[in-house]
Image (spheres, rainbow, N blue to C red):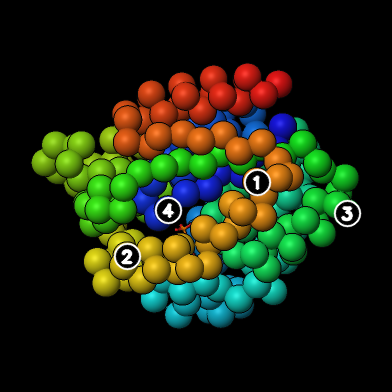
Amino acid sequence: MHLIIFGAPGVGKGTQAKIISKILMLKHISTGDILREEIKKNSEVGLKAKSYTEKGELVPDDIMGEMVKHAISSPEAANGFILDGYPRSVNQVNILNKILNELGISDIQIITLDADEEVLVERLTSRRQCSNCQSIVNLKSIEGENVCPVCGKENTLVKRKDDEEYVIRNRFQVYKETTKPVLDEYKNEYPILKITATKSIEEVTEDILQKISKQN
Ligand code: AMP
């Protein structure tokens, strides 16, 4: 099974992709997570990508294309994948089509998560990421101390640099102008499963699983 999860910043793509990948035993490929790892390691790719991610701009297509090709063709993706954060532009759709053609993959399903922009801005300003297990946590849902509710480590919850409000606004602008048109490219090609993302995490997961199973 090959899934692409799509939606505005903060809509819960990463959270849902992580859960769904475990349930369906798919490789979770998050281009944002891969980039954050590379930046942390100060690798060549990380050094090139850093200035873009900090401003909420898109990292150049050649860097992203190589990264995605490598991830999709890795042995861990042999059972399928859920792609999170890619493609983010019409040009990336074309690059991905080429990669998928080369690998003979055509059973793609697109999951779109929908929510109101202001709800998402509010969510993003209060979200933190665990530097140990990479889980995304909302400060409003945990009590007091800086302890990751997923892995239990202390002092690991950090605000992503691109979760400052002015960067968030820029990410929405990029999403509306460059990323949303991706859906039009796919609407006649692959099934698009529309999901309302303002319910609880568990309910959204349930909705996704139900819609996926209806397709198969
Ligand atoms: P995310 O965690 O998916 O919100 O990604 C964080 C940041 O990484 C984005 O704001 C971009 O700067 C960069 N990024 C992630 N995926 C892509 C992509 N497909 N193309 C270009 N830049 C990306």
Amino acid under label 3?
Answer: Glu
In primary-sequence order, the first of circles 4 and 1 is 4
Residue at 73% in and 58% down: 96
Q: Position of residue 51 (x, y in %)?
A: 45, 80
Image depth: mark 4 or mark 1 in front = 1
- Find numbered disc 2 in the image and state the secondary structure of the residue it sits on: helix
Residue at 72% in and 32% down: 1
Real-space Cα separation, disc 4 to disc 1, in angstroms: 17 Å
Q: Position of residue 32 (x, y in %)?
A: 51, 59
**Mark 4 lies on residue:** 8
Image depth: mark 4 or mark 3 in front = 4
Real-space Cα separation, disc 3 to disc 1, in angstroms: 22 Å
Real-space Cα separation, disc 2 to disc 4, in angstroms: 11 Å
For the residues bearing labels 3 and 2, Cβ distance under 8 angstroms? no
Amino acid under label 4?
Answer: Ala
Residue at 19% in and 37% down: 142
**Mark 3 lies on residue:** 102
In primary-sequence order, the first of circles 1 and 2 is 2
Residue at 67% in and 24% down: 215
Amino acid under label 1?
Answer: Lys
- Find numbered disc 3 in the image and state the secondary structure of the residue it sits on: helix
* CA neighbours of label 2 inside 10 A, class few (<14), some (14 to 19), many (20+): many
Q: Position of residue 75 (x, y in %)?
A: 78, 43
**Residue 118 shows in this picture:** yes
| In this picture, residue 57 sits left or right of residue 121 | right
**Mark 1 lies on residue:** 187
Amino acid under label 2?
Answer: Ile
Real-space Cα separation, disc 4 to disc 3, in angstroms: 29 Å
**Mark 2 lies on residue:** 168
* CA neighbours of label 4 inside 10 A, class few (<14), some (14 to 19), many (20+): many
